[in-house]
Image (cartoon, rainbow, N blue to C red):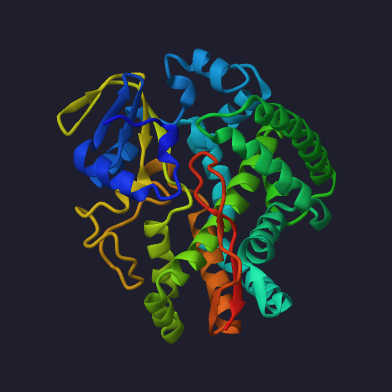
Amino acid sequence: MTYTFEGLVVPDPYPLYRELRERAPVHRIHDALWLISRYADVRALLLDPRATSDPAARPDYRDWAERHLDGVDGPVARWQRSMFVFMDDPEHRRLRQLFQQAFTPASVHALRPRLEAEAAELVKAAGTSMDVVSEFALPLTTTLIGELLGVPQEDRATCVRRAEITGRTLAPIVPPAVLEAAAESLAESTGYFLDLVERRRTEPRDDLLTALTAVMTPQEVVSSALLLFNAGHETTTALIANAVHVLLGHPGQLDLLRETPSLLTGAVEEVLRFEPSFQFGLKVTRAPIELDGVTIPAGAAVVLLNAAANRDPAEFPDPERFLITRSEGRHLAFGMGMHHCLGAPLARMEAQVALGALLAAWPCFELGPDEPVRAAPAGALRTLERLPIRRC
């Protein structure tokens, strides 16, 4: 078999994932790039201390950054390396612990009433038809992350736009025009958040930005704010849109959810397994690692296909079926180990609230007259650009 990294992001990647699992679960593209697709292997590497999340650990990182980014000292490369999700302990642990207060069960639960009110208002304002992405999921997630951080409402749309531009640089291949736009966006975002940090120093408020300002350097706060805007709205917007789309494609399961709202938690978990927003992650081997009798050399970039692992029949019986009552297995949509997604509880709550509000206001809904439009490939993200629906 011959696969390219870019070829992993296709309109329907799941047949390819299945072929990889069955025929080449530890697949070498070349010595410096490997694909891992079985559940047990992906899980093992997520937990293996010999596999790092730091892309700069690659021996060829300097050359790679020159070819695919703006060089090791460019603003985009420096921004990527500044995010704690790409760090190892002890620095990763230090920064992660500073965020924990915002994502405890109690903190997340406290946000629920505000989120429920916003979701209900958005559905009401839609009338009898709406685009799930632009009129529901995006404003809902933007409101939450904006309020959590403490970004004024009038600035949130601009912050989202800038975050989306910089987020495109996390794709496997980044066109020069995107790098140029991202560098400009980073400069604008840095200036904006440095100014906001200074205001929080003199006028503290009850928000995450104020809390981070008290314990981080200004540059760490800026990097963290940019990361939260990227991860806090884009992936959860994708989760909500994917959930509605998958449910509409499985009318029997949608009917079951309408009849039994208590299955909402399980429905969100099954969406995360069946159609995760993030399809894959990247690790770099610091030492040789053997999987299934194959040795991956040190210094290799290893693509962990969590979306493929989530449909591994060794972990999930009948994995190609979407079943909101499923109880077997533990999906890898949020990763595992020390880099398990910090915002997972918040994302779960947002998706549950969004689906609950939609089902409560629109007991029956269907696809609109226009076809859904899947978003163009953007790194590991799988989402929709438009999803028109209407009340029955």
- The foreground one among 83 and 243 is 243
Residue 40, quarter of the rendered image? top left
Q: Is residue 222 above or below residue 257?
A: above
- The foreground one among 48 and 294 is 294
Q: Can you give x and y, in whole percent of width and height, for residue 267 in the image?
A: 41, 70
Q: Is residue 239 above or below residue 294?
A: below
Residue at image position (42%, 14%) is: 59
Q: Can you give x and y, in whole percent of width and height, for residue 321 in the image?
A: 30, 65
Looking at the image, residue 321 sits to the left or right of residue 269; the answer is: left
Q: Decide if residue 185 is in sight here.
A: yes
Q: Which quadrant is the C terminus positioned in?
A: bottom right
Q: Is residue 342 above or below residue 130?
A: above
Looking at the image, residue 292 sits to the left or right of residue 378; the answer is: left
Q: Which quadrant is the N terminus positioned in?
A: top left
Total count of labels: 0
Q: Is residue 32 above or below residue 213?
A: above
Q: Can you give x and y, in whole percent of width and height, for residue 175 in the image?
A: 61, 28
Residue 286, quarter of the rendered image? top left
Residue at image position (71%, 58%) is: 147
- The foreground one among 273 and 385 is 385
